[in-house]
Image (cartoon, helix red, strand yellow):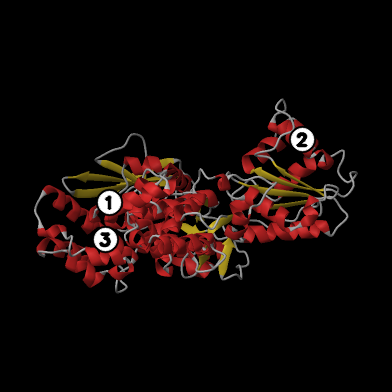
Amino acid sequence: MSTNTHFIDVLKRCKQSSKEAVENLEGFSEFKKYMHVQRPVEKELENFIINANQTNEPQLILVCGGVGDGKSHILSYLKDKYDFLANTAKFYLHNDATESFSPRKTSIETLAKVLKPFSDQEIGKSGIKTIVLAINLGALNNFIDSEEGKEFTRLREFVHAKRIMESVITEEVSQDDHIFKYVNFSDYHMYELTENGPRSSYIRGILQRITQDTEHNPFYNAYLREKAEFPEVALKNPIVQNYELLQHRDIQDKIIDLLIQAMVKEKLIISTRALLDFIYNIIVPSSMDNIDHEKLMELITLQDFQSYTSCLLPFQLFDREDVSSIHHAINHINPTQYRTELLDQHLIDFKSRKDGAYLFSQYIDVNRAPYFAKSLVPHSPWKDEDKKSVSFRNELVKLFVYFYYLIPIKPHNSFEDRVYDQYMQYLFYWNKRSWSMLSKLYREDVRDAIYKWNGEGQGGLIYVQIGQPQTQYYALQKLEIEPALERVEPRVEEILMKFLPMLTIAFRPKGGNPVEIDIDYSLYSLLIRIKNGYRPNKKDKFQYIKFVEFIDQLSSRGNDKNELIFESKKFGKSQRYRLTYDDLFDQYSYTEM
């Protein structure tokens, strides 16, 4: 990279449209080498490849996953790292998403040709060549179920035995484990689970690659040159300021937490490419994108304080909903949506004080944004009452909330989400199989929601749907349920790299078989609200139809099918009647309770 490259130009290498974003197996640039951060799935694949090189038996190593999860990047990195992968007599690397032999061949026909040495007829007869195949799970499923796939029954049996297509993590043994190997990127995530909450060593690594103070960091070197060559402009350059804010570890912590929340709450899948593009967009404001350096310097020189403020990192992080799917997801967990007594008091202070600029110095570590700190009082919009000042004042109140989230002077819990924190702790314990830590989840959170879903029946009674929905008459049934646990050995790891991203909970009606339900964060948060008194509406029941079906299955397998309770509600008064079937005499009795 040229030493004359401007800071903005180096940052642009993170953009999704950058040529650096294009992956292939034939090249791994110096920039990509610097940016590479090892992931646990890479180590697993690396071990398979090293072992394959040390054997004289052909192997098929499947590198499975979804679109954009980094399969091609890791294969390119390993090919650059190990010279023996270039030995075509011993290894062949194939990326099913990008490579084909002929435009006339379908992807399935191409795969059949590539994998022919591992067909039922050829397996074990074709020398020592190992094939490393990067393939999306959908493409793998289509192949083994295709007409061509009928020639690969041993491969299909291996895929089924390992349950690669299912949302499970299994260590099942297959008779062909010595021939077929696989790593599944879908088993890994961009974050890890711990007892104290999730974390992401990978996102941390990417942020450090971009911001760390080292001579090997092209971003940091360009940043230093920018400050040295254009010192006066750099003082009020929001790109420089945003980069300096991003260097702080506590700000990185907050951004990492936001990204993990987006993945969990919004079910967002973040690729490395999308992550780098996101980082670019929180450093570089849209008004300063796609212009050359000379015009950028002119724009910064002429900008007023309000324009500068609108370009700061908090606004780029929270107020650019349309820029990317990551920004869109983060907008849904925006700190301005939180309401606590402490935060509300600060917002009231803004209305009661003559100059709200004072509150920044009181509660925000504002010196981390030195030009903003120096310029706020002289340019305070509280001094005037014109329309522009009112608009800027509102923007500053919003900025206060954002800064109060990112860089408060004193720690506080104004943005704490206890339901999310509890869910992530349960997710850790569930994947770890620490059943004793899940008692409250089963016996209170989920169980209470089951009984209260259609109304609180009390005394082991559950409301059941019979015929058309009623407003005056209701039916109840006695239902006794118990958690159904799979007794397996707990995992010993304290940091879970490989895990399932949702809870699978099972209950067993007395005398019946277990019924399972998958609980993601969204459903869990609803169940907690129901436990606390909320009544689900039609929209809830439509959105969470699987939970409705789960309750119906429990009710249909209930232990007291010979008795129904009918409840009549009139004018706020409730009266119950019991309908009982005596199967010995084949007759019904109807009594008032």
Q: Residues within 10 Å of mark 3 (few under 14, many from 20)?
A: many
Q: What amino acid type should be assigned to the residue bearing mark 1?
A: Leu
Q: Residues within 10 Å of mark 1 (few under 14, many from 20)?
A: few
Q: Name the residue nearer the viewer: 573 or 373.
A: 373
Image-quadrant location for residue 492:
bottom right
- Please identify, in this view, whether the residue under mark 1 or under mark 3 is nearer the observer: 1
Determine which residue is flagged by label 3. Answer: 401
Q: Secondary structure at mark 3?
A: helix
Determine which residue is flagged by label 1. Answer: 302
Q: What amino acid type should be assigned to the residue bearing mark 3?
A: Val
Q: Secondary structure at mark 1?
A: helix
105 with respect to 589 (left or right) = right
- Please identify, in this view, whether the residue under mark 3 or under mark 2 is nearer the observer: 3
Tell me the residue at 87%/50% (across/down).
Answer: 128
Determine which residue is flagged by label 2. Answer: 112
Are the residues tagged 1 and 3 within 8 Å (C-beta)? no
Q: What amino acid type should be assigned to the residue bearing mark 2?
A: Ala
Tell me the residue at 25%/40% (across/down).
Answer: 471
540 with respect to 113 (left or right) = left
Tell me the residue at 62%/58% (across/down).
Answer: 33
Residue at the top extreme, as displayed: 104
Are the residues tagged 3 and 2 within 8 Å (C-beta)? no
